[in-house]
Image (cartoon, rainbow, N blue to C red):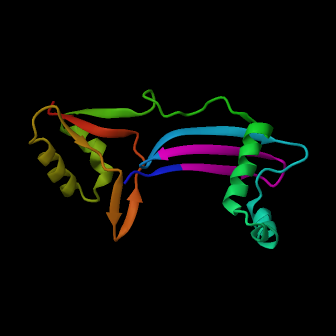
Amino acid sequence: MNRTIISIEVQDHGDKEATIIVRGERNSQIMFEEAFSYKDEKKHSLRLHLLKERFIKTFPKLGESLGIICIRKLFNDITIRSKMKANSDYRDKRIIKKSIYLHGRKEIEDFFKEEFTEKEELNKYVTQLLQYPDGASFGLPSHYSIDGNQIVVNRKSQEVVIFHS
């Protein structure tokens, strides 16, 4: 099953200025990230804690959804009262390297050293990798299961190509 997440993060100091960050992910890979500078003399950006109180008192009677109200408010905050910051991150080919090329045992060990707690395990793993033909490629996992908990790793590369020298 594929998983797509569009998230909106609001960073503020309680005043009428904020940074709104919109991020898009597909299967734990960040596809884009955009930041907007929010500034309005009359209105605050989304203040969820106050909106929730108001929602609980008023909106359920009207049949509204708190999620829809938040999205509508943030959409207006971004499109009407914000300016896009200069450097959008669209995670294109210039940012994500699909493949990393590793040449020789030392480069391979350096690349995988943080994946293993013991040097002996690392040596055994690298020895196994070097038994494959020169130029063999391996996909890098994006999900781990540790003690029954799902851990997601956002990697900038998706595969490693191993060369013996």
The residue shown at (31%, 50%) is 141
Give the residue furthest to the right: 42
How many discs mark residues in the rendered view? 0
Residue 106 in the image: state x and y as whole percent: 22, 38
Q: Nearer the viewer, residue 83 or 14?
A: 83
Residue ID at (21%, 52%): 122
On the question of residue 107 being in view, the answer is no
Quarter-of-image position of residue 157? top left
Q: Would you say residue 128 sits in the magenta stretch?
A: no
Q: Nearer the viewer, residue 97 or 82?
A: 82
**Part of the protein shown in magenta:** 6-25
Q: Main secondary structure of the magenta part?
A: strand
Q: Quick check: 110 left or right of 16?
A: left
Q: Is residue 131 left or right of residue 45?
A: left
Q: Is residue 7 rendered magenta in the image?
A: yes
**For the point 84% across and 48% down, which residue is it?**
16
